[in-house]
């Protein structure tokens, strides 16, 4: 049972444009959500998070939106830069439970 | 945040053999987590390693297949036993902390290919 789903395995965006990565979840008990970025041959690194009491969190070029009624999470990157090319993982947890990850979306930023 | 070193970074193994992955953290941590990422799949938690006690395994993972050691607060090993091609994955060590208590910091991972 895949509780966190990233339905787009890949996404290609022009440099300077907005990148939107999507994530859906099924467990209504999830109360904390995170995005990780992973470069080849490196471990995932934390990017941004959001608590379920908020619907938006912004950090520089990165904004995460949470729609609890739709059980949907999205990460917006604007403007997109070539260094943003990586695999992005959505993750969620319920209280002190383990983190549950999505399958990842490979983002490619084209010059 | 903690700095995690894993080795080997990659290896090619023969079916039926076992391989031990080492994870070293630059600070003392209570819990260390071992994850697996199969090709094209999400990161799946294998087990949680606590110093001084048996590791706690997630559903679908057993100690005979993935024995874990945790001799002190900065070090852990994961062994992948009696390997088959299905065990070809990236194995990642992680600890809590960094940008917040809810955030995991990961090592670079160990990419195993089983022939």
Image: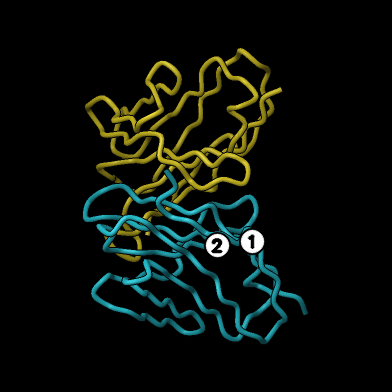
- Crowd tier of the residue under label 2, counting other residues whose Cα lies within 10 Å: few below 14, some 14–19, many 20 or above: many
Where, quadrant-wise, is the C terminus of chain A in this rendering? bottom right
For label 2, the SS is: strand
Residue at 65 percent across and 54 percent down: it is A40
Name the residue nearer the viewer: A109 or A43.
A109
Q: Residue furthest front?
A: A70
Q: Residues within 10 Å of mark 1 (few under 14, many from 20)?
A: many
Q: Residue at x 60, y 83 (%)?
A: A18
Circle 2 chain: A
From the top left corner, tell me how far across and down residue B12 is, in percent: 69, 27
**Horizontal relation, residue A34 to residue A75: left or right:** left
- Residue A96's label in the rendered image is none
Pick whichever, A56 or B82, lies toward us: A56
For chain A, give the colour.
cyan
Label 1's element?
strand
Residue at the disc numbered 1: A106
Pointer 1 chain: A
Q: Are marks 1 and 2 in contact (CB under 8 Å)?
A: yes
Drawing shade for chain B? yellow
Q: Position of residue A58 (x, y in %)?
A: 40, 82
Q: Would you say B49 lies left or right of B109 here?
A: left
Q: Residue at x 64, y 36 (%)?
A: B10
Residue at image location 71% in from the left, 22% down from the top: B115
Which of disc 2 and disc 1 is earlier in sequence?
A: 2
In this rendering, the answer to whether B58 lies above or below B2 is above
Q: Which mark is residue A88?
A: 2
């Amino acid at each position: 049972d895949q509780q966190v789903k990233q339905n787009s395995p890949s996404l290609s965006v022009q440099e300077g444009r907005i990148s939107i990565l999507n994530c859906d979840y099924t467990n209504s008990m999830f109360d904390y959500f995170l995005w990780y970025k992973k470069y080849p041959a490196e471990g995932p690194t934390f990017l941004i998070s959001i608590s379920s009491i908020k619907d938006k969190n912004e950090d520089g070029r990165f904004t995460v939106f949470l729609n609890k009624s739709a059980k949907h999470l999205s990460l917006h990157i604007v403007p997109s830069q070539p260094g943003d090319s990586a695999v992005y993982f959505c993750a969620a947890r319920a209280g002190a439970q383990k983190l549950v990850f999505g399958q990842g979306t490979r983002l490619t930023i084209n010059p | 945040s903690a700095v995690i070193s894993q080795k080997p970074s990659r290896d090619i193994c023969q079916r039926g053999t076992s391989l031990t992955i080492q994870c070293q953290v630059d600070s003392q941590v209570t819990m260390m987590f071992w994850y697996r990422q199969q090709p094209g799949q999400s990161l799946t938690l294998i087990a949680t390693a606590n110093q001084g006690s048996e590791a706690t395994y997630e559903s679908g993972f057993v100690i005979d297949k993935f024995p874990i050691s945790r001799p002190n607060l900065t070090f852990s090993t994961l062994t992948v036993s009696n390997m088959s091609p299905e065990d070809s994955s990236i194995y990642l060590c992680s600890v809590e902390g960094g940008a917040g208590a809810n955030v995991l910091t990961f090592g670079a991972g160990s990419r195993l290919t089983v022939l």
